[in-house]
Image: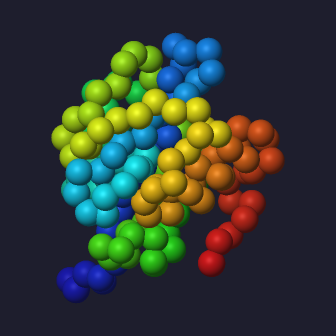
Amino acid sequence: MIRPETPLLAADIIIELVDRSDRPIVLIKRKYPPVGWAIPGGFVDIGESVEQAAVREAKEETALEVTLTKLLGIYSNPGRDSRGHTASAVFIAEASGQPSAQDDAADIAVIDIQALPDDLVFDHNQILADYVSCKRGSYIPGDVIKK
């Protein structure tokens, strides 16, 4: 059988820290190019679901055990990742505790969603804007198809 060439598949996670009153989110500073701040995430391994990959990547990069609560959306713009065409399933998750930079995270930040750093990588500005809209109740995944 000839397999088609397809985009890589990733899972990204917006982690809300529910043990803090303002429910800040966790960002990682990427150790490898493209360098900058990002929501935790990574590639789906053969034999695992995107949900399993999201939980694994959260643990590997932040040392947090997460509970997935919602699928925010699928982001697949061919130019979203400078390393090549990658589609990502983006989840919202909850966790408690103190995150710490692990694996390919050079640093970690716990931030208020209104205080995002300027150097977010990939399309994470758009993803986090969609997250804010979702939290306000004005965004439902699938409402807007981005070309």
Can the viewer see residue 68?
no
Question: Nearest the camera: 114 or 20?
Answer: 114
113 relative to 77, above or below: above
Q: How many marks?
A: 0
Which residue is depicted at the point 46% across and 55% down? 120
| Quadrant in which residue 114 is drawn | top right
Q: Is residue 144 left or right of residue 40?
A: right
85 relative to 141, above or below: below
Q: Is residue 88 left or right of residue 129?
A: left
Q: Position of residue 39 (x, y in %)?
A: 43, 46
Q: Please state, as top left, top right, bottom left or bottom right, where the N terminus lies in the image.
A: bottom left
Which residue is depicted at the point 71% across and 38% down? 135
Can the viewer see residue 77?
yes
Q: Position of residue 90 (x, y in %)?
A: 49, 50
Q: Please state, as top left, top right, bottom left or bottom right, where the C terminus lies in the image.
A: bottom right
Q: Position of residue 142 (x, y in %)?
A: 68, 59
Question: Nearest the camera: 37 or 133?
Answer: 37
